[in-house]
Every structure is written in C-alpha cells, then in structure tokens.
Amino acid sequence: MDAEQRFRAMQAELAFLRAEMDLNRKYIFERPAALVIGAVTAAATLYDGTFEGFDLLPALFTALFGFNLWFTHNRLQSTARIISYLQVVHTPDGAPSWIGWEAALRKFRSTKVERVRTRSVPRQPEASRFYGPILLFHVLAVLATTGLILAQVYPDGIDLSSLARVQRAAVIVDVVAVIGLLGLAWWVRPITVRHTIDDTRRIWERAFGREPEDG
C-alpha cells in the first residue's frame, strides 16, 4: 500500500469510527424515557383486578431497565476505546503504527496492562458526563415503577404470609429483580467510566509498542 492509499484508508477509517461514536450516543436518553412511559402506561391502564401475573410486571421492567443500563455502559466503553485509539494512532507520531481498526482491535484484546488511576480526570465525552444522572434515573425509575404496580395490586400492603404461593413467588421475584438492578448499578457506577479513556489509551500504547513492558 503506497502513501496515498494509506492516507485514503485512514480517512475512511476515521469517518467510520466517527459514525460509530455517533451511533453509540443515539437514544442514550430516549430509551430509558420510553421504558418509563411504557411502565407507567402499563401500571395505569392494565390492572383491573383480574389480570393474573400483573404483579410480575415490575420484574419484567426491571430486567429491561437493567439491560439498557448495561448496554449504555458498554456503549460508553466502546466510545472511550475509539477516542483513545484515535489519540494514539490518528496523529502524526502514531500514523506509522496504523494497521487498520480490526487488526488493531485484535492487538488490543490480546494486550494486558495494569490499569493505573490518575488524579487528573480528562475531559470526557458528553455521554460520559451525563452517565451519573442516567444511572440514577434508571434506579429511581425501577423503584417507582415497582412501587406503583405493587401498590395497585396490594393497596393494603403486602403480607407474604397471607398470599397465595404464586403471588408470594411473584413478589419475591420482583424484590430479587430490584436487588439485582441495584447490584448492576453499583458494578457499572460512574467511577468505572471516569478514567476509561486513560486506561484504554495505555492499552493501545502497549499494543503498538509505544510503552515498555514494565510500564
């Protein structure tokens, strides 16, 4: 590949990666809002006292919120991986190391590096700066939805000892789902993405031989 072909390939790759970052940012606010609307609509319109299994709806919506939260966290990690790659490779000093995104990803995934936290926090992508409120929104939405639906089914409160076995199991599933969501929220809490760009940049540098093996 001559210099001109290499330049064109890098330009095409840059356009592709920018499009990928734009895709990662899409619907980051719209998806949880749509879930809330769906949950509130279901809670307000479906229950008539005869619909069996209604008390399992909180677990269903909690699972959907959990998946969306995990997906959002994954997209932020992907964006940070792209940004740090551009910082390392798509620069005058890094251009000679360019081997293409897919080949570079294989090197990245096979590279191990100790992740060192720094006190200085670099400017993060817009989605990362809003990640904390997004996570909190998921947690509050799950708690509110669960409370709203169960309050309709059990307006006088929940006494597990007086419930039928199926109802008792449904309430337990709802509670376990909420606990699971809270555990996921802790696992993907904002601090896990605060230094992601620094961490992934260090791995890219190691992958391209820009850093000695002993750090």
Image (cartoon, rainbow, N blue to C red):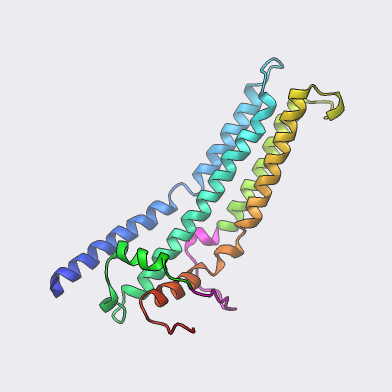
Side of 4 relative to 75 (left or right):
left
| Place of residue 200 in the rendered image (x, y in percent of width and height, measured from the top left) | 46, 69
Residue 164 sits in quarter? top right
* Residue 159 visible to an observer of this rendering: no
- Residue 200 sits above or below residue 154 on the image: below
Q: Is residue 82 magenta?
A: no
| Place of residue 173 in the rendered image (x, y in percent of width and height, measured from the top left) | 70, 34
- Residue 177 sits above or below residue 7 on the image: above
- Residue 1 sits above or below residue 28 on the image: below
Give the quadrant of the N terminus.
bottom left
| Magenta-drawn segment | 113-130
Q: How many marks?
A: 0
| Place of residue 122 in the rendered image (x, y in percent of width and height, measured from the top left) | 51, 73
Side of 94 relative to 120 (left or right):
left
Q: Is residue 121 magenta?
A: yes
| Place of residue 207 in the rendered image (x, y in percent of width and height, measured from the top left) | 39, 74
Along the viewing direction, whichever of 128 and 58 lies nearer the viewer: 58
Work out which residue is located at the far top of the displayed protein and give it: 50
Side of 102 relative to 120 (left or right):
left
* Residue 103 visible to an observer of this rendering: yes
The residue at the point 62 percent across, 46 percent down is 138
Question: Magenta stretch mostly in which secondary structure?
Answer: loop
The residue at the point 55 percent across, 63 percent down is 193
Residue 36 sits in quarter? top right
The residue at the point 33 percent across, 67 percent down is 104
